[in-house]
Image (tube, rainbow, N blue to C red):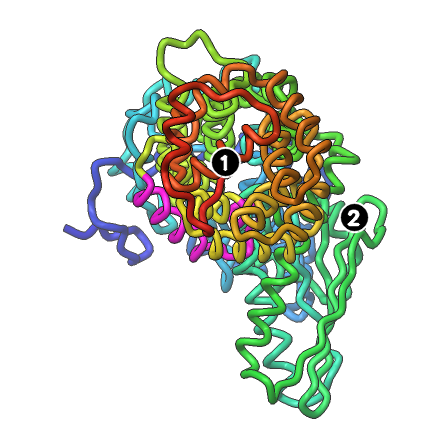
Amino acid sequence: MQNELPDGRVAAPSSPRPPPTLDDIRDQLARVVNSPEFPGVGRSAAFLTYVTDEVLSGRGDRIKGYSIAVEVFKRSEGFKQDDPVVRIEAGRLRRALERYYLVAGQNDPIRIDMPKGGYVPSFVWNDASPNPDDPGLSRPRAQWRKLMPIGVGAALMLCVVVTALVLSAYLLPGLPKSLKAQSEGPTLVVAPFANLGDGPKAALYTSGLTEELLTALPRFKEIRVFGRETSTSLPSEVEASQVRDELGARFLLVGGVRVSDDRVRVTARLLDTATSEILWSQTYDDDIKSGDLFSIQSDVANKVATAVAQPYGIMAQSDATNPPPEDLGVYGCTLSFYGYRAELSAVRHRRVRDCLESAVARYPTFATAWAMLSIIYLDEDRFQFNPSTNATPAIDRSLQAARRAVQLDAGNTRAHQALMTALFFKQEVAEALHVGEQALATNPNDTELLGEFGTRVAMSGEWERGAALLDRALALNPGGGGYYHGTRALAAYMLNDDKTSVIEIKQADLQKFPFFHAVAAVIYVNAGMMDEARREATRFNEMRPDFVPNVVAELKARNFQPGDRARLIADLRKAGLPASDEVRESMLLPVHSSSVLVPR
């Protein structure tokens, strides 16, 4: 049965959860306008309060540009409609609301919006808010029903009391004023790219490129990207300081497009809004004859997104060297995670594990933190970094955390990376690679995923394809983690490419990572560099004395093929490591030229 609202509109069909009540909406209004993340200056708060009160009082049909100008902006009754004040302020209010729900209000129970084309606000249950019936997150978040803008009559008919538990989750003293810690991370605004050419091709390419960027960038879940409404409301020449002051965004992406005959040139720049400093710039040239316009703009957008937004990209590098002052710690955990991945040391592992465990305890719906914690738990087992006294095995905790991350955010690349890796070490290789393929299709430009997936593919025996994936990751991100180079070195060793294996292992240089020394040892044996091989083998045995006595089991756990295991063990022996009877027996297996060994 449909519910007819006082102004003639029809609400959504009845649902297990009733729509927000008047008190719910008033509480949310107070939460928004009193937040430090909502503009404390200007007229946005008065604007939002006025239009909300009008709707809740049953006067939503009276909300017009004229009434707002007179009641909010104190224009005289002779106000002319050609005065743009209301339209300008409405645009600012929409951007302020978007920023609020992007940063501080992501987990608020109710979302207040002002749809384009009018000034009547809408009030909906926030899809990102936690399910009060599922505080342990053992099931997927409920998909709350949205309600069209309501009038007082419908609200009174459907009024219910929301449990004190839900409200107290947001109103208890002692909680942070802002929940932005869950959504911490660099915030980015994409200004419309400037059309520097003439003719329909230039206009088409320019608008299409901005749209492609707004599609490609949000795939990187460690960053927050303002949406299309904010982007399209800005001039292409917007000042960085304006973006910082009005939206609070840390970064601004700007650029221009010039089309001349069959040539397209795109310039892109990333700016720090606090200083207006250009952190990165690049020029891309294409020939329209070599491909269709849409393919070219998609390719350029992906290149720009990868350069600035990937885990080891320009934005992450900037935050790593100059953390934002508003950082409350959770985003700091993600930066520390990538620092750990670049070094792979037991000391960093412990610190990051403690940080991430604290983060998910405080913000249990933060999918990226769960994904990172999954990988950290796995490292307890595969690298023997800081094994926990927890009764649940590390591999099981890793898989549980990965599944929770995917459950919370099915589009999160890091979550799928964690699930793929946990399944791989759970000996579910086919399922692991399937998950990896799907994740790669979703975000083919995430070099952290590319490197991890390339490693899994290689270790499963497909060394050539694994090497190709790793080459792609290194091409997209030359400054990425050393383990990219380490795994690529191992792939070259397995493919009997001594020159590449030696170059890559020297570039890896992971001195605190035990398996770096094992891979270096076998590479140097193959290259005839015996002094270096013995040195690396000795260092590996000092760091992991438990590995050699259990080498066959260790390699099986990493899903090496029998011939690959035999080849690795043989070269470790040549480097000077002892071999047990079990190892000697395994060496009787045939060694295939395409076989190899990989650090997991």
Q: Closer to the camera, 502 or 89?
A: 502
Q: CA distance from mark 1 to mark 2?
A: 48 Å
x%, y% of residue 229?
Answer: 56, 59
Say above or below: 270 vs 355.
below
Res. 38 visible in picture: no
Quarter occupied by residue 157 = top left
Q: Residue at x 65, y 17 (%)?
A: 347
- Horizontally, residue 367 falls left or right of residue 231, namely left
Say above or below: 98 vs 184.
below
x%, y% of residue 21?
Answer: 35, 34
Q: Secondary structure at mark 1?
A: helix
Q: Secondary structure at mark 2?
A: strand
Say above or below: 285 vs 235.
below
Quarter occupied by residue 179 = top right
x%, y% of residue 284?
Answer: 71, 72
- Horizontally, residue 49 falls left or right of residue 285, namely left
Quarter occupied by residue 403 = top left
Residue 495 within the magenta-colored segment of the rendering = no
Per the rendered image, the range of residues in magenta is: 429-451
Q: Amino acid at mark 2?
A: Asp
Residue 272's disc is 2
Q: Which badge, 1 or 2, comes first in the chain's sequence?
A: 2
Residue to which mark 1 is pinned: 568
Q: Amino acid at mark 1?
A: Leu
Q: Residue furthest bottom?
A: 261
Q: Are marks 1 and 2 in contact (CB under 8 Å)?
A: no
Q: Residue at x 69, y 51 (%)?
A: 478
Q: Closer to the camera, 324 or 473?
A: 473
Q: Closer to the camera, 335 or 46?
A: 335
Residue 437 within the magenta-colored segment of the rendering = yes
